[in-house]
Amino acid sequence: MKVLLLKDAKEDNCGQDPYIRELAVYGLEATLIPVLSFEFLSLPSFSEKLSHPEGYGGLIFTSPRSVEALELCLEKDSKTEVSKIGLDAEGESSGNAEKLAEYICSREPSTLPLLFPCGTLKGDTLPKMLKDKGIPMESINVYKTVPHPGIQENLNSYYSKQGIPASITFFSPSGLKFSLEHIQELSGDSIDQIKIIAIGPSTARALATSGLPVSYTAESPTPQALAVGIRKVLQSHCC
């Protein structure tokens, strides 16, 4: 059974994307199509802030792109570790803002603001929670999310060769925004037969807002949780 995942492929130590491998365990043939691309912003300004660590109480990361922006700045300044600029770094995925906020609040209080490199589409959950706790934070946009340049061509190729997928998994509200029109056009009336899967609650909310019924929301953003959920949904559909 063919399933479509709207994400870029990332090989692990075994040389294969873990989502493809995990879904194959359940007899599902997964295809990955990237729908997002990223452009870095304000790196000189970010580098300038990093060069004055005495003005900040730490760094917060909620996305891999923010970490990449940091690495670019450190490479430019011939520094290889965050510790060498005198800052502590805290990280958590954007889907766990509450958990990250709780951890930050449990630390020794500081009057210095936390530096938060983020994307232009960042949510307001973490900033609001820290503000409510009286913890100062300074945000700087270091990247923006844009559509992948090959999204339409790749989707056209998939549908012409593979046909209508049994399920489509969306990995972010941005990915949904950039791909939905193409998918609706290619699927036609058959879109009602496709099981729509969300990798997390924010994506599920975006899907509901767009009018697409969500068949399953992964309990955690992992290959294992997604594979179990897709198998369950498709088995139920077959029965």
Image (cartoon, rainbow, N blue to C red):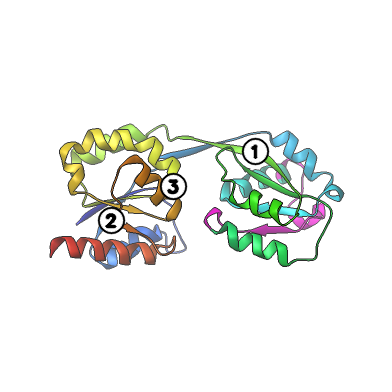
Residue position marked by numbered label 2 in the rendering: 215
Residue positioned most to the right: 54
Q: How many marks?
A: 3
> Where does the magenta region start and end?
75-95
**10 part of magenta stretch:** no
Depicted 104 relative to depicted 156: above or below:
below
Amino acid type at circle 3 is: Ser
Residue 25 drawn at (x, y percent): 28, 68
Residue position marked by numbered label 3 in the rendering: 172
**93 part of magenta stretch:** yes
Amino acid type at circle 2 is: Ser
Q: Residues within 10 Å of mark 1 (few under 14, many from 20)?
A: some
Q: Nearer the viewer, residue 5 or 185?
A: 185
Q: Is residue 12 visible?
A: yes
Could you tell me which residue is drawn at 65 percent across and 38 percent down? 141
Could you tell me which residue is drawn at 83 percent across and 49 percent down? 53
Could you tell me which residue is drawn at 72 percent across and 67 percent down? 106
Identify the mark nearer the N-term, 2 or 3.
3
Q: Nearer the viewer, residue 195 or 214?
A: 214
Query: Within the image, what quadrant is residue 162 found in?
Result: top left
Depicted 182 relative to depicted 175: above or below:
above
Q: Is residue 81 visible?
A: no
Q: Nearer the viewer, mark 2 or mark 3?
A: 2
Q: Secondary structure at mark 3?
A: loop
Q: Secondary structure at mark 1?
A: strand
Identify the mark nearer the N-term, 2 or 1.
1
Mark pair 2, 1: CA separation: 34 Å
Q: Is residue 32 left or right of residue 43?
A: left
Residue 214 drawn at (x, y percent): 31, 52
Residue position marked by numbered label 1 in the rendering: 141
